[in-house]
Amino acid sequence: MHRGAGGGTLSDTSTDPAGRESAVDRARRRITAIVEQLDLRPGDRLPTEAALTERLQTSRSTVREAFRQLEQSGLVVAVQGQGRFLSATGGLRVERPMTQYESITEVLTARGYRVTSAVLSVAEAAAEPEAAAALEIEVGAPVIRLVRIRFGDDRPLVVSENTVPRELLPGPIAHRDWGGSLTAALAAHGEYVQTALATVSAVDLPAEWEEPHNLAGMGPWLLVTEVGLSITGRRVLHAKDYHRGSEISFTVLRQR
């Protein structure tokens, strides 16, 4: 699952896993879609607040807040007395930018893969120091630890180790389908992962997974370590996702 810090583009919009957007998020997403439909270029003027209010069938204050967020992201520039214009950054089209938060399923599906999962292990456990620090819980606090291989067209592409505070996913773990999206499972219990803090590094796959699961010789792997934050700011997911380096890459827009 991915969302790092960095500059955005007009592709850098998101919905929560359950599809429950706020009115402002929905307006922002639809405004960016309109920009693409109109094929606007840097320096082109965007439709007015009044025009978008009517087109989107929403309130003017909602459109104004959506514009404010786009301006803060550097995608839109407001010129007093003249209107709002597409910035140079906003004119860039970065497909699936790393700054966009997505689940592994979304990442692989967007690349055209047929996605399946194999659950290597799922267990109730005591939080280890790394996960405890990331989730801001006590070492030894009850968590669920899930390890899976995500396949794209039956080829192993991502090995994931996820840790979630136990109370966020109530009920017996034996009766839950762990092959699906963990982000969606959290959303179903009211914890909508909206952002994540991530670090990326090139590593070898841990030996405890490499040999037993016939994954030797597929490295190096691109490790994305991140903590997912809910819309309330609570840290709800610690993820260590090992991406097969020969198959998966990420695009990042860098700004001075």
Image (spheres, grey):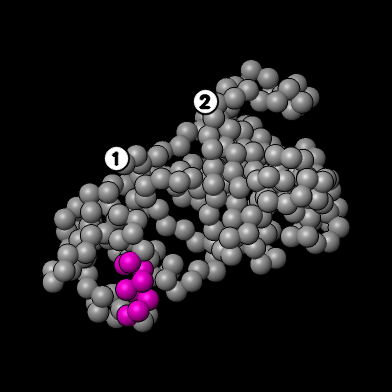
Number of the label disc, if any, that sits on residue 246: 2
Say above or below: 150 vs 232.
Answer: above
Q: Could you tell me residue 247's position as x and y percent? A: 52, 30
In the figure, is residue 69 to the left or right of 129? left
Whether residue 63 appears in this view of the structure is yes
In the figure, is residue 3 to the left or right of 162? left
In the figure, is residue 38 to the left or right of 138? left
Inspect the image, locate mark 1, and give the three-letter code of the amino acid beneath it.
Arg
**Looking at the image, which residue is at 64% across and 17% down?**
217
Whether residue 214 appears in this view of the structure is no
Inspect the image, locate mark 2, and give the three-letter code of the amino acid beneath it.
Ser
* Nearer-the-camera pick, 77 or 135: 135
Verify CB contact (< 8 Å) between mark 1 and mark 2. no
Q: Could you tell me residue 246's position as x and y percent? A: 52, 25
Number of the label disc, if any, that sits on residue 256: 1
| Magenta stretch bounds | 60-68
Number of the label disc, if any, that sits on residue 71: none
**Looking at the image, which residue is at 22% across and 70% down?**
47
Say above or below: 19 vs 131.
Answer: below
Task: Identify the element where label 1 is drawn.
Answer: loop
